[in-house]
Image: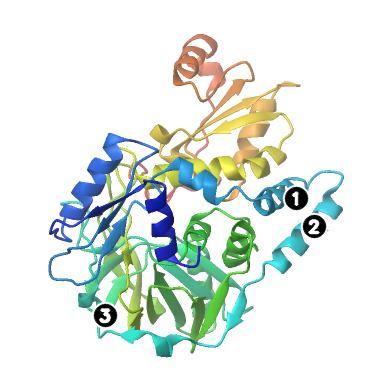
Amino acid sequence: MKDLRDYLKYLQSKGRLITINDRVNTELEITAYTDRANRDNVYESKTLLFTNVKDHNMPVVTNLFGSLSTMNELFSNTYANELLYNLSALKSQSGKISLIKTSKLLIDSKPKIIESQLSKYLTIPNLDHLPIIKCWPNDAGKFITFPIVITESPKDKSTNVGIYRMQVFDSLTTGMHWQAQKGGAIHAKDAEEMGKKLNVSVVIGTDPYNMISAVAPLPVGVNEFAFAGVVRGSQTVLMKNGKYPPVPANSEIILNGHVDPKEKRIEGPFGDHTGYYSIAQEYPVFHIESIYVKKDPVYAASVVGYSWHEDAVIGQFLFDFMKPIIKATNESITDVYLPPEGIFTNMCFVSIKKRFPGEAKKVMFSILGLGQLSFTKIIVVFDDDIDIRDLRKVAWALATRVEPQRDVQIITNATADSLDHTTNLPSF
């Protein structure tokens, strides 16, 4: 698929795209349609293309990844399976061989950088010309909800690609909701230590491999655009972007600007995937210096919240897709499951084939040491005779096999997800 438009044609050929020609408002109405589409069919919901958006001549597409079938089709190539197998084997006896294979696979998929194609794009003066949506009634305003944020460390030139929501403060200024442990925030910290501002590129709309790779919880050091090349089966093509980080050559919309690491502003609340409004807190500010759009661009947005939307589909798929790496950390693990009711890292079920006393605790700590799983609030370890994907069996095991005073371990003073509103202190 060359770009987002190719992806929409693919979805249409599969009967997974609904075109809505009714006039809709960016404030709440697009969310209402998208919310209904997800409630009617969780995990196999349709993508919605809104062609008649009030006060805008640009279509909006939502729920791009609401179908688990689509996700499985997109990521079904052997290159992706080989990469994950090699990554999961790094700690085994064949680790050196696996590392060589993994490195070769990623090197072969290193993004190709071409000269700038921005002369073929149109320019618009500010964000007022984009159909940015307000999702939920008590949101602080309009948010760019599926931005692909690209940064480069001023220290070592390493690249990070992530999805960080962006609250619109005014026509040329937004928030940048990157948490302290995220790659973008780390690059901003590097810039602050060097007394510099951080140049940032933001892309709205590109091919599905770039979009999903930006979400994926990849191991530190794995370039997201290289990973996209692996799962696509061909190199990601980036184009030079002046003083800003290179962007996908198939980008629909490009925002260029900078973040001053010393500048913070209250961001939020925002109706998040937890089903609650995230607490308003201080986050960095993104100052936009130029905006480029394709001819007849498509604006991509995501709607999250209770009950499950495309974020649950993406999270469920990516967790199962990356599971070989998690299982490789402890050979006793037979299955790992993040139930959607647990809002991703708020709850994790693990089944193990227990071999010695205390192994359940060992498994718990190994999970807490893995990337974003360090935010896990509740970990439940089961014997391997329990199907942890069957909530009836899970409830039965909890009721009949647990003596709370003996079996519950409380870990205090630990890192928490910044979106967890139940903590006494933010992110702690």
Residue 162 pos. (x, y %): 48, 63
x then y, percent, for residue 386: 58, 17
Res. 159 visible in picture: yes
Mark 2 to mark 1 CA distance (whole Å): 7 Å
Q: Residues within 10 Å of mark 2 (few under 14, many from 20)?
A: some
Distance in Å between CA atoms under marks 1 and 3: 44 Å
Give the vertical position of 258 relative to 319 (above or below).
Answer: below
> Which residue is disc 3 drawn over?
172
Amino acid found under the numbered disc labelled 1: Asn
At x 63%, y 51%, the residue is: 77
Asked whether the beta carbons under mark 2 and mark 1 sit within 8 Å of each other, the answer is yes
The relative height of residue 214 versus residue 292 in the rendered view (above or below) is above
- Front residue (pair 137, 313): 313
**Which mark is drawn over residue 101?**
2
Q: Which residue is mark 1?
A: 86
Give the mark, 1 or 3, whose residue is nearer the N terminus.
1
Q: Which kind of residue does numbered mark 3 sit on? A: Leu
- Judged left or right of residue 146, residue 71 is right
